[in-house]
Image (cartoon, rainbow, N blue to C red):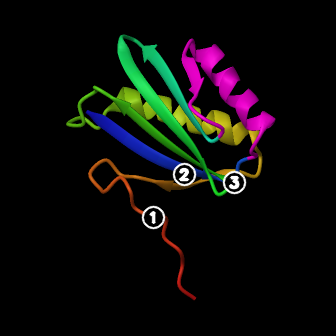
């Protein structure tokens, strides 16, 4: 089972973020469900592969993305990674100050904090 995580910061909380996610769901033919004010789920099927994106708005300006699918990790889950990259590009392209500050690797721990440089 494929599982990838990314953190985007900063993102704009509120209508801009909701509109961006709604556009993505419509463009990809997916189903976006807001679980509460800060958490959403995007379900979609791409080339027969079912994917689930969980989105968590943290501390007002961080967006945590978790994508899972049944694609095997032996080859690195290329279709799942490709869709994650597209989602990251879509969000960062519509929020010019945002950038991906953390990406989990395929073999590492999922809940690892971003590295902060020591001065």
The residue tagged 1 is: 113
CB of mark 1 within 8 Å of CB of mark 3? Answer: no
What residue is shown at x 69% (from left), y 54% (from top)?
61
Quarter where residue 109 is shown: bottom left
Indicate whether 102 appears above or below 57.
below
Name the quarter where the C terminus is drawn.
bottom right
The Cα–Cα distance between marks 2 and 3, rounded to whole angstroms, is 10 Å
Q: Where on the picture, by quarter, is residue 34?
A: top right
The spot of residue 23 in percent (x, y) is: 70, 22
Q: Residues within 10 Å of mark 2 (few under 14, many from 20)?
A: many
Which mark is first along the chain, 3 or 2?
2
- Give the class, few, some or many, for how many residues have Cα within 10 Å of label 3's Cα (few <14, many ≥20): some
Badge 1: few (under 14), some or many (20 or more) residues near its Cα, within 10 Å?
few
What percent of the width, then of the height, locates residue 75?
24, 35
Q: Label 1, label 3: how many angstroms apart (C-alpha)?
A: 16 Å
Query: Looking at the picture, does residue 102 appear above or below residue 79?
Result: below
Give the label on residue 42, or none.
Answer: none
Q: Residue at x 68, y 23 (%)?
A: 22
Tell me if label 2 and label 3 are in contact, CB under 8 Å.
Answer: no
SS for callout 2: strand
Q: Residue furthest bottom?
A: 119
Lower position in the chain sequence, tag 1 or tag 2:
2
12 shown above or below 89: below
Secondary element under disc 3, as helix, strand or loop, is loop
Dot 2 corresponds to which residue?
7
- Secondary element at image label 1: loop
Task: Determine whether, in the image, residue 66 is placed left or right of residue 32.
Answer: left
Q: From the image, state whether disc 2 or disc 3 is nearer to you.
A: 3
Mark 3 lies on residue: 61
């Amino acid at each position: 089972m494929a599982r990838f995580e990314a953190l985007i910061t900063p993102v704009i909380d509120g209508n801009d973020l909701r509109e961006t996610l709604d556009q993505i769901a419509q463009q990809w033919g997916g189903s976006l469900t807001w679980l509460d004010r800060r958490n959403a789920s995007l379900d979609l099927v791409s080339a027969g592969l079912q994917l689930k994106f969980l989105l968590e708005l943290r501390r007002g300006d961080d967006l945590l993305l978790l994508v899972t699918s049944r694609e095997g990790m032996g080859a690195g889950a290329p279709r799942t990674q490709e869709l994650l990259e597209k989602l990251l590009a879509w969000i960062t392209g519509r929020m010019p100050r945002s950038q991906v500050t953390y990406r989990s690797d395929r073999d590492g721990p999922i809940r690892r904090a971003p590295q902060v440089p020591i001065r």
